[in-house]
Image: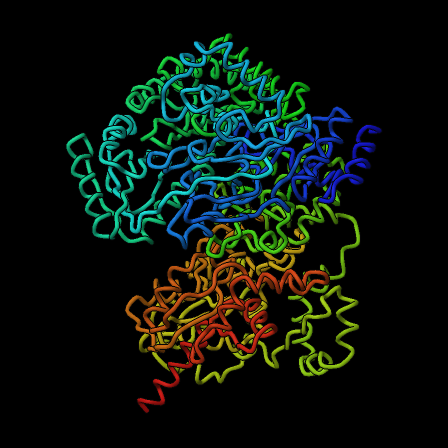
Amino acid sequence: MAVREGLERALRAAVRGKVAFDAGSRALVTMDASNYRRVPLGVVAPFDADDVAAALAVCREFEVPVVARGGGTSVAGQATGEGVVLDFTRHMNAVLAVDPGARTAVVQPGAVLDDLRRQAAPHGLTFGPDPSTHGRCTLGGMIGNNACGAHSVAWGTTADNVHELDVLTYGGDRARLGRGLGSLPGPLADGLRALVDGDLALLRTGFPVLPRRISGYALDALLPERGTDVARAFTGSEGTLGVLTQAVVRLVEVPAARALAVLAYPDEGAAADAAHLLLPHGPLTVEGMAADLVGQASGLPGGGAWLFAETGGATAAEAASRARDLCRAAAADGACGHTVVADPAGQRALWRMRDDAAGTATRLPDGSEAWPGWEDCAVPPARLGAYLREFRALLGRYGLRGAPFGHFGEGCVHVRLDVDLLTDEGVRRYRDFSGEMADLVVAHGGSLSGEHGDGQARAELLPRMYGPEMVRLFERAKAVWDPAGGLNPGMLVRPYRLDENLRFAPLPRRPVPVAFGYPGDGGDFTAAVRRCVGVAKCRETAVGTGVMCPSFRVTGEERHSTRGRARLLHEMLAGEVLPDGWRSEEVHEALDLCLACKGCRSDCPVGVDMATYKAEFLHHHYAGRVRPAAHYAMGWLPLWLRWAAALRAAPLFNAAARTPLAGAAKRVGGLAPERPLPRLAAQPFTAWWHGRDARTAEAGSGNGAPARWEHGRTPGHGAPAPTAEAGPGNGAVAVLWPDTFTNYLSPRTGQAAAAVLDDAGIRLLVPPRPVCCGLTWISTGQLHRARKVMRRTLDVLAPALAAGHPVIGLEPSCTASLRTDLPELLPDDPRARRLASSVRTFAQALEELAPDWRPPRVDRPVVGQTHCHQHAVLGDAAERRLRERAGLAGELSGGCCGLAGNFGFERGHYAVSVACAEEQLLPALRQAPPDAEVIADGFSCRTQIRNLSDGQGRHLAEILAESLGRKACKHA
């Protein structure tokens, strides 16, 4: 403890960047995307190279090791450490220059690859290596691991694209690495010269020849006949030789057009046999995937495995022609089907499936967990088919399963295996398997790592690949660069055992008591948290990359990413760094800015559902304690609104909301002072529905007269099912769900939906008593109360469920809650599952129940917001089709509006809420044509639009109902 405190004081005095030794900051970097976990003393975010030098000097003084960290997506454990972690993503993250004439770029180590690609794109250039994590991996990490990606067939590995590197050694020397030893500090130059001169024969003969040899140090790059390329030899050293502070990288020309040849084969062995045969035709990439990873994906020709072979050309026609040539060649070499995808959108959809594979492969089709470790071995491409067959046989002997995929054209295969890393016996078996696996790779002339580096996962086995003499040479190289052993110890040389420091070891061995059912994780909250493997798709910030994670996109703080929050929950369960369990303030602080948008439920490749985890945490965190005022003000909102309606207090409330009393009410309720209070409707939707003239209800007013809810006895206790009146045009019967927001705050939406559904011939039922999905109690973690509310709702709806009537939801958040939260909070109640499966959105109901109905033509452009819960849980394909049929042209904004139910109303959240809206929604509104319809099906989205712009968002039902009225007037 004394050492840590002294180290922290010294770093704070010496470094201008952020120095963080608190438990939360340390917990965020205990893991990368591997199976390993190491707890650091502290984290430093250096401001510049001088800061790096100062931090290294302090760490030398205290004899503390240093680990450089970029995006934290390393898969072998090399981005974790026990000493000081240097986080380059906060400050040293810029693309400093792009020189199109020289085709080079100057970057800092924390620069994200896609940022470089975006800046190079206007010049027709890109950085060739493109790992699937291109939206969040950093150039420093890529140089540390010698990352490759799908297009190394055309443009090589990172080592092939590095020109000059500025580095600092642990001893404090600054060096610019390029070709030759002349620019190096004297001792370093002398040491490398002696290393090469003393072992020329070994350096010339000891390395396997294959395109993806990443394991070990690339010392052969120091040979005189290879130009003594020190920068290339340094690339792939995994932060064990020096700390990168700046890099000059080479750029390559991008083809003007691309096409994708998708080639089908009977099985992965046949695809692997054929991959190298495509290389003479000059593809940009040859990627492979088998059916056990693809699942139900569409757009693929029939087969058991596929190769994605991309071609380029000066025109789209030329690229497509080359793709067709590839298809003909593949057909002659065993392909059983093929298709050419020329349109960019279709290509992006297929590549997205490939990019997400690093995450989706962590869950097998039956839900079993699968882990990295042996996910990127590489063999000579011509031997890939034979290697994969023997690999499958080895898996069979150990009873293991996995879904291989990857860079088949380069002989590199990724696979996550369902190894048991949770028990001592399972870990022992994994160790035995690893030894046999290494021998199999070596027998085929391969490399233990073909992309991700050795780290802790494979470094112990390097003697099997290189032999003891070469490994001793690696150790001597490490001693030349880092004689004190202060940089990333335990990686590459003198390594940790591959079964040490496993991330699972400190987790509870038995499920912890929880409220949600976690059906995809066997009811185990710990298993749910383990879903986050660290691939960090949640750290992507480019517009169009999904909804998650809105608060991270605003703050850039790891703790506000889905991964960061999952890491903190992991450490909470482990109890070492965060010992307070459910009372952890570090976890509470990180979850406070979670909007519960559920974007991660769909956007995260492994389906992490942070909204549910947040509700679970709040439930336990405040158990037996007084909650924040906003939990009572917003969590109990359905009850307050019901009372206000019963007392007919809406006019009084609305008048008070425009006086100084509103400010006092917001202070008492824990609400944001900047946020206007919403207006209450004078008459709830249910009162309007049930109070209509009985004669109108009996006679009907259109194709579908309203149906009548028969409830002679207590609902749920033998009451007869709701019935539909007989009458002309009688069609399907459905329940129109009167959610809290529609009912009390936006009844016009319900009335409009009723009119449209009536026009479509759908007979509607509305529950005779108040019902609620429980959303506001869930989002504030009041799960006991949420269950009570849900059970009462199921009692009321029991007759309709028994009759098999679908339930139409108008508010996406409430509809999504019925679809997911309801069965997960009441897993033992079959009625919950029945209701969840009965739920339809407004557009889904029209499409399913009235397929022949034609919506009125609106023929106007649209702008607005797709609700996050619609995106994440319900899907919006039916809404898109309905808008198209109605002539509503254009796309709605993605991302999140930022209000997110109670989030944007709570004190302290307003700035983040507005910043979220500024990402996509508000710019889209400002750029919209004057006649554009502003569509926002969610009440939160409409409220945010009204609060922050001059626009007035409307539900799609309102727009269609208005057009129906115009049509009726026209024909009258």
Q: Residue furthest bottom?
A: 972
x 42%, y 32%: residue: 160
x and y percentages locating residue 961 in the rendered image: 42, 78
| In-front residue for pair 602/655 | 602
Write the residue at 27% across / 28% down.
276
Using the rendered image of the protein, determine whether residue 182 is visible from the camera's viewpoint: yes
Residue 26 x/y as whole percent: 70, 37
Q: Position of residue 735 (x, y in %)?
A: 46, 66
Judging depth in this view, the residue of 448 and 691 nearest the camera is 448
Give the answer, above or below, for where 916 lies relative to 493: below
Please state the total of marks drawn on the protein image. Answer: 0
950 displayed left or right of 157: right
Q: Is residue 900 visible?
A: no
Which image quarter is the N terminus in?
top right
Q: Quadrant of the C terminus?
A: bottom left
- Colour mapping used in the image: rainbow
Viewed as shown, does residue 665 lie left or right of 918?
Answer: right
For residue 896, which quarter of the picture? Answer: bottom right
Taking the image as shown, residue 859 lies to the left or right of residue 427, namely left
Residue shown at the point (75%, 24%) measured from the top left: 63
At x 65%, y 57%, the residue is 777
